[in-house]
Image (spheres, helix red, strand yellow):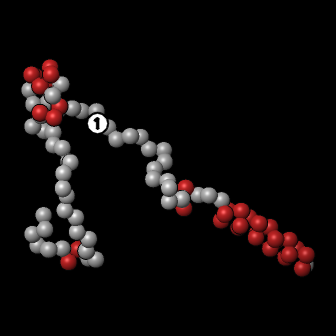
Amino acid sequence: MTDKIKLITLLYSISFFSFSTAQQPWNDLRVMEQNKLAPHTLVIPYGDEAALDSLDYYGSPWCRLLNGKWRFMYVARPADIPRKFY
């Protein structure tokens, strides 16, 4: 009976340590994404036909660049957000 317990304990230990030491992608801080396509759009809205002919995408009234300064604020709870933070 004790030989069976020793064998089971040994097998359990081997399987536990082999799984825990294996490099998992969610444990690796260098992995930022996996199996992900690059962001893209399938629809390009243009302001008028002239912009469409010249392929002036950024001249469209429906295109807004998000480059620039952004204001972020971290708060512990939603109740701590200032009233006019936006």
Q: Residue furthest bottom?
A: 2
Res 9 → quadrant: bottom right
Residue 1 lies, in percent from the top left, at: 90, 78
Left or right of residue 83, residue 70 in this image = right
Does the rendering let one see residue 19? yes
Q: Residue at image x 80%, y 67%?
A: 11
The residue drawn where x is 81% and y is 71% is: 10
Q: Position of residue 55 (x, y in %)?
A: 18, 25
Name the foreground residue: 67 vs 80: 67
State the residue lying farthest toward the top: 53
**Left or right of residue 36, residue 5 in this image:** right
**SS of the residue at dot 1?**
loop
Q: Residue at x 10, y 22 (%)?
A: 49
Residue 66 placement (x, y as % from top left): 20, 48
- Total label count? 1
56 over 71 or under it: above or below: above
Q: Tell me: residue 45, above or below residue 3.
A: above
Q: Which residue is mark 1?
A: 41
Place of residue 63 in the rendered image (x, y in percent of width and height, measured from the top left): 15, 39
What crowding class fits label 1: few (fewer than 14 Cα within 10 Å), some (14-19), or many (20 or more)? Answer: few
> Position of 72 compared to 6: left or right?
left
Q: Quadrant of residue 57?
A: top left
* Rendered residue at 50%/55% (across/down): 30
Q: Amino acid at mark 1?
A: Thr
Identify the image quadrant of the C terminus: bottom left
Q: Work out whether residue 26 can be spotted.
A: no
The image quadrant of residue 85 is: bottom left
